[in-house]
Image (cartoon, rainbow, N blue to C red):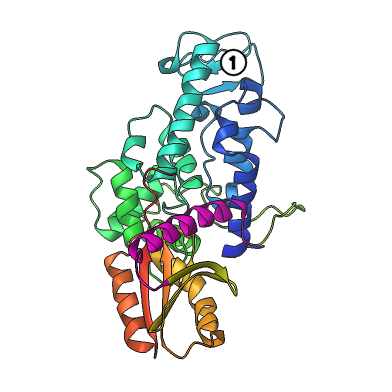
Amino acid sequence: MINDTHSLRRLLDDFHQRWPIERIENLTLTEYVSVKNPDTFCQWVETKTKPLGSIQGINSSKFGIYKRQDPSERPKPYSNDDQYSWRTVFGQNQQEAFRNVLRDVVNTARFAQNGDYALIDSLELTDMYKWKLAYLFSNEQLLPIFSTTAISKVSKTQGISLNQPRSSILQLIMANKPIDQTVYEYGSALYRQTLQIDENTSEKGKADEKPSKGRKAADKLPKGSQKRSGSSGYIADLKHNRLQQRLYDELVSEYLGQDVKVVLEENYVDIKVSSNDFVKLYEVKARGTASDCIRDALGQVLAYAYRDSSVCVKEIIVAGECAPTPKEAEFIEYLKNTLDIKFSYRAISLDGIR
């Protein structure tokens, strides 16, 4: 069994290479959902990315529209034609329903990518499905646990009120992520915690409803062989490039008119800012939290500082998209006070260029 963070990130990268948002926008109904086709979009979200968090446990109606295995069955809660069933809220006929389902799928992906999680709450897709989608497109900024039961129990252990939108609950849970855990490690720990709650709250031999075996966050990878991409990740590379260019533009503007050089990719350093008095070495990371950016970058940037032959004051800066949480700010202060070198973290905003 493989459950390491690196392998799970590679699986997420596989998903994004197969299903970029631009492709999802132009899906046909048969590409979106079908019967006995393991390569549809819905099969990827439910089955192929199951190690990233399961949404099994309810039938295919969670996808908004689905193709029936037995065409003669016409489930009464839904609208039906000769082959497909859909939630009536999405439309009066198959074409209209699929168009509206796909609209919500694309909006969920784009809202998650932009960090506009509150806009996802009102979309008509089922909670389990749309928050799995949101997680897949959130750059690891959302929790990979999707069942209402598990989220409710995690919220209870953390003292988080359930009388608020799901987007707020998920962000509050993520705010409690320990800085030394990735989102996958945190999700697994919380899932195990919900199981422990189930085991300890039985009454007269009857335990609370337990999550099904499928509701594991970051638990198992498929055992079959899979084609893997480069180590850095396709989506991470795209985000890194945008972050790096934005930071470069900001630094050029900040030092405009001064006797300072701002250079991209010198001796493997993402950005080097230098003058006669100082050298600043920037390492950009595209992780979902400030602490993950720091953990990934710190060894690299310390090595860069060691190799740099400049004799003036050196400062190393890890840069990422996310602003530090209060816990992460404490971690940064600890590093600044511990390292015998100037160190800082810088958040880069991609507003308007996502």
Q: Is any part of residue 208 visible from this angle?
A: no
The image shows residue 310 at horizontal and vertical percentages of 49, 87
At horizontal 43% and vertical 29% (from top left) the residue drawn is 125
At horizontal 49% and vertical 12% (from top left) the residue drawn is 96
Please tell me which residue lies in front, 353 or 99.
Answer: 353
At horizontal 54% and vertical 77% (from top left) the residue drawn is 300
Residue 246 versus residue 345 in the image, above or below: above
The image shows residue 106 at horizontal and vertical percentages of 48, 31
Residue 310 versus residue 180 in the image, above or below: below
| Residue at the disc numbered 1 | 84
Residue, far right: 225
Residue 207 versus residue 82 in the image, above or below: below
The image shows residue 2 at horizontal and vertical percentages of 65, 63
Please identify the quarter of the rendering in which residue 181 is found: bottom left
- Position of residue 69 in the picture relative to residue 288 (left or right): right
Please tell me which residue lies in front, 50 or 299.
Answer: 299
The image shows residue 336 at horizontal and vertical percentages of 34, 82
Residue 228 versus residue 276 in the image, above or below: above
Secondary structure at numbered mark 1: strand
Q: What stretch is highlighted in magenta?
A: 232-260
Please identify the quarter of the rendering in which residue 148 is found: top left
Q: Quadrant of the N terminus?
A: bottom right
- Bin the neighbour count of mark 1 within 10 Å (Cα to Cα): few under 14, some 14-19, many 20 and up: many
Give the dominant element type of the magenta stretch: helix, strand or loop: helix
At horizontal 66% and vertical 22% (from top left) the residue drawn is 30
Q: Which amino acid does label 1 sit on?
A: Tyr
State the count of labels: 1
Q: Is any part of residue 131 visible from this angle?
A: yes
Q: Is residue 256 magenta?
A: yes
Please identify the quarter of the rendering in which residue 104 is found: top left
